[in-house]
Amino acid sequence: MPDVLPPDSVGIVTPQTLHFSEPLLLACGKTLTDYQLVYETYGQLNAKKNNAILICHALSGHHHAAGYHSMSDKRPGWWDAYIGPGKPIDTNKFFVVSLNNIGGCHGSTGPSSINPETGKPWGPDFPKLRVRDWVHSQARLADKLGIEVWAAVIGGSLGGMQAMRWTLEYPERVRHCAVIASAMKLSAQNIAFNETARQAIISDPNFCDGRYLEQNTIPRNGLSVARMIGHITYLSDHDMGEKFGRDLRSGSFDIGSDQEVEFQIESYLRYQGGNFAKQFDANSYLLITKALDYFDLAREYGDDAIAAFQNAQAKFLVISFSTDWRFAPERSHEIVSALIGANKSVTYAEIESKSGHDAFLLPDERYQQVFGRYLAGIVTE
Amino acid sequence: MPDVLPPDSVGIVTPQTLHFSEPLLLACGKTLTDYQLVYETYGQLNAKKNNAILICHALSGHHHAAGYHSMSDKRPGWWDAYIGPGKPIDTNKFFVVSLNNIGGCHGSTGPSSINPETGKPWGPDFPKLRVRDWVHSQARLADKLGIEVWAAVIGGSLGGMQAMRWTLEYPERVRHCAVIASAMKLSAQNIAFNETARQAIISDPNFCDGRYLEQNTIPRNGLSVARMIGHITYLSDHDMGEKFGRDLRSGSFDIGSDQEVEFQIESYLRYQGGNFAKQFDANSYLLITKALDYFDLAREYGDDAIAAFQNAQAKFLVISFSTDWRFAPERSHEIVSALIGANKSVTYAEIESKSGHDAFLLPDERYQQVFGRYLAGIVTE
C-alpha cells in the first residue's frame, strides 16, 4: 500500500452486502431460497442511470476489483490497473459495479455459507451452478441498484463468459459487452486441467467428502496442487522461462554434490499454491471449475454460435493475448466470427504480450489504449 | 494378444537379469555397491559385434520394448511398432538391447528394491540419479554383453537425453545416435509440471515420507494425479479435442437436470491415472522426474551446446513432432543447431503429427520411413 493514495486510484472502498429473499431458480432445477451478494461500487451513477458498468470476475476473482479496503492493504483490488479515474474503465465517467458471485467464497452465498435447512455449511450440497445462474443473480443486483441497462458488461476469462451470456439472457439490458481472454466453450484440454485439479482436491483426505468445515479442517494440500496446475496454465512457457528459467533457489549441480537442488520455479509455484489454499474454499473451486467446464454458449442454439448471438443487441469488444494458451486467440477469433456472422458490431484486438492468460490482469500500454478508447466511445449523457 | 504372432513381431521374449557387483559411483557422490539390470534382447549379435542397438526408455518406460512375454499378453512391448523384423529398428539386421534403468520399478534396482544396508526397501533413501548415471550403468551392461561399440543408441524423450549423453561420455562407443522428441534441457514450464506432479505424490498422506512400502500402502491418489498431469502434456490440445471433444460419458445439460455431468476426457484421464498408480512406484516417479529436471546437456561445457557436442563421434538423427508441446520442435532445432555448429553429421526430420509428445511411441508412416531409412544406412558387415 502506498503512503498516499495515487490520484488515479478509486481510493478506500467498502464492500456492501445485499440480501435477496426472492428465490432464485437455478439451471440445475434447484432453488436458492435466500442468498446474499457482496459487491463494491466505484464512481457515481448518473441521473440517467446509463453509465453503469458491471465487472464479472473469473475463477479466483471476487468483488474487490479496485482501490483499497484500508490504508494498511498491501495491494489494491485485482483489476486496479484498469479501474479508476482516467483509467480504461474511467470512474470519472462510469459507475462500476463489481460483485462476488454466488458459489464463491468472499462473502456472497456459497458452499461455505450456512445452509438454512441444516444449520451447517452447505459444503458439497451447494447446488451446481452454471454461468447463466450468475447472470440471473447479477440481474437481480442490477434491479436493486436501479440499473435497467448496463452501459457495459465486462469480464475476462470466465468473466467474459458471463458477459457473453448477459447479451443472450437480457439482450435489451446490455449496450456494450467486453469479452477479454475468453472462449465460447472449454476445449477437452481445458477440461482435463480442471478435472486434474479437482481430483487433487477430492483425493485429499482432508476433503472429507466436502464436509471439511464440519470436521474443522481444509484440504490444503489438494487445493495447493490444484492451484499449481492452474497457475502453470495462466503463464506462458516463454514468460516462465524469462522469469525463472533454470535458476536455482538452492543446491548445486556439482558432480559429487548430494545437496537437494531446488529450482526457483518450484518454490514459486509451491508458494502460490500454499497461499491460495489459505484463501480459497475447496468446494467453491470445484463448483466454479465445473461451471467453467459446463459453459457452452451455443449449446441450446443447435451448436450454432451465429444463431446464439442473433438476438444480442450489444456492441462487442473482444480482446485476446498472443501467448495465452489457456484461451488462445483462436478462441476469440471464433467469437468474432460468430458475431460477424450474426451481423453484430464487433471490435477485436489481439494484444502482443508475453504474459499468457494472466495478461488480461496486467498493465499493458496497448491493451489499456484499446480498452480505454473503446469505453471512451460509449455515450452516457 | 493376437491368436497368431504377427510375422513382423519379435515374438515371445523373456527378460533377463544381470547382477553387477562392481560399485557404481553416481554423480551425486554416493555409490551403488551392488545392483541388477533387467533387459531384453531382440535379434542376433553378429560375429563382428557391430550391429547392436541400445534402446533407452523414457519416464514411464521399461525393458519390455517389443514382442510378447506370453501368448496371453494383451499388448506387446511399448515400442513394438518400431522394433521387429522389417520394422525401422529391423531385428533381421540389428541386435537390440532394451533395459530397465536403475531407479526404475520394473525389475532393475530401484527405490522399491531392498537396501542391503537396512534390509528394508530403499524408498526415499535411494540415491539421487542423473542421466549420466544411467549411461554409465548401460555401459557396464554393454561390457557384459561384449558390445564395445553400439551401432546406435536410440531414445525418445528422456531416452533421447540418455542417447545424447552417451555420445559425450563414451564418444568412441556410439556410431549413431537417434534423439527423438527430446531436448537438451527442460524449460521452466516442464519443471513446473514435474514439480506439481511430485507435490501431488508427496502430499498424499499414504506417501508416508516415502516409506509407504514399509507401511504396506502406496500413495495411489497422488500418483494418479501426477500421471493425469503428465498425460495432459503428452497429448496435443488438438488431438484431445478430436478424440474427446466435449463428449459426455454421463449426465445431461438439460435445464432443470441435476444429474452430474461427466465428460469423456474426465473419465479417460482418471482411468489413465488410476491404472498408472497400480503399476508404478512413487519413489521411482520422483527420482526419474528429478533426473529429467536436472538434465542439462551443456551445463559443464559453459552452457555452450556446440562445445558439448565437440567430442562426439556419432552421426545423429534428430526427430521432432509438429504438435509436441512438451518437447516442441524448437527444442530439436536447438539440438540440430548445436550439432551443425560442432560440425557433426546430422539428419533432422519434423514429422507432421496430431498426437503431441506421444507421437514418438505411435505408428506413423512418415516417421517409420524416416527412421527406418536412416537405420538401414548403418553399415553392419
Image (tube, coloured by chain):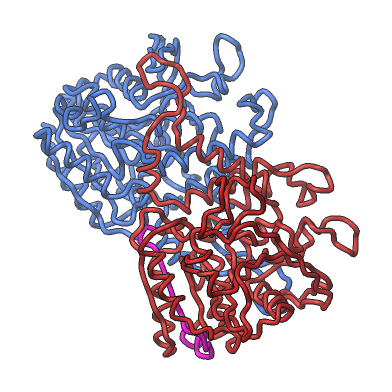
Chain colours: A red, B blue
In the rendered image, which quarter is residue A37 located in?
A: bottom right
Residue B103, horizontal then vertical, whole percent: 46, 25
Q: Viewed as shown, does residue B364 lie left or right of A335?
A: left
Q: Residue shown at 52%/44% (left/top)?
A: B227
**Nearer to the camera, B149 or B146:** B149
- Height in image: B280 above or below A375? above
Q: Residue shown at 41%/12% (left/top)?
A: B29
In the rendered image, which quarter is residue A104 located in?
A: bottom right
Q: Residue furthest left?
A: B343
Q: Viewed as shown, does residue A380 lie left or right of B242?
A: right
Q: Is residue B95 visible?
A: yes
- Which quarter of the rendered picture does the C terminus of chain B lie within? top left
Task: Tell me, yes or no, whether the highlighted magenta stretch contains residue A309.
Answer: yes
Residue B7, horizontal then vertical, whole percent: 31, 49
Q: Residue shown at 51%/78% (left/top)?
A: A177
Q: Is residue B275 visible?
A: no
Number of numbered labels in the structure image: 0
Residue stretch rendered in magenta on the structure: A305-323
**Nearer to the camera, A137 or B120:** A137
- Height in image: A12 above or below A139? above
Task: Tell me, yes or no, whether the highlighted magenta stretch contains residue A207.
Answer: no
**Nearer to the camera, A271 or B39:** A271
In the rendered image, which quarter is residue B99 located in?
A: top left
Residue A318, horizontal then vertical, whole percent: 43, 74
Residue B149, horizontal then vertical, whole percent: 19, 24
Q: Residue shown at 12%/39% (left/top)?
A: B340
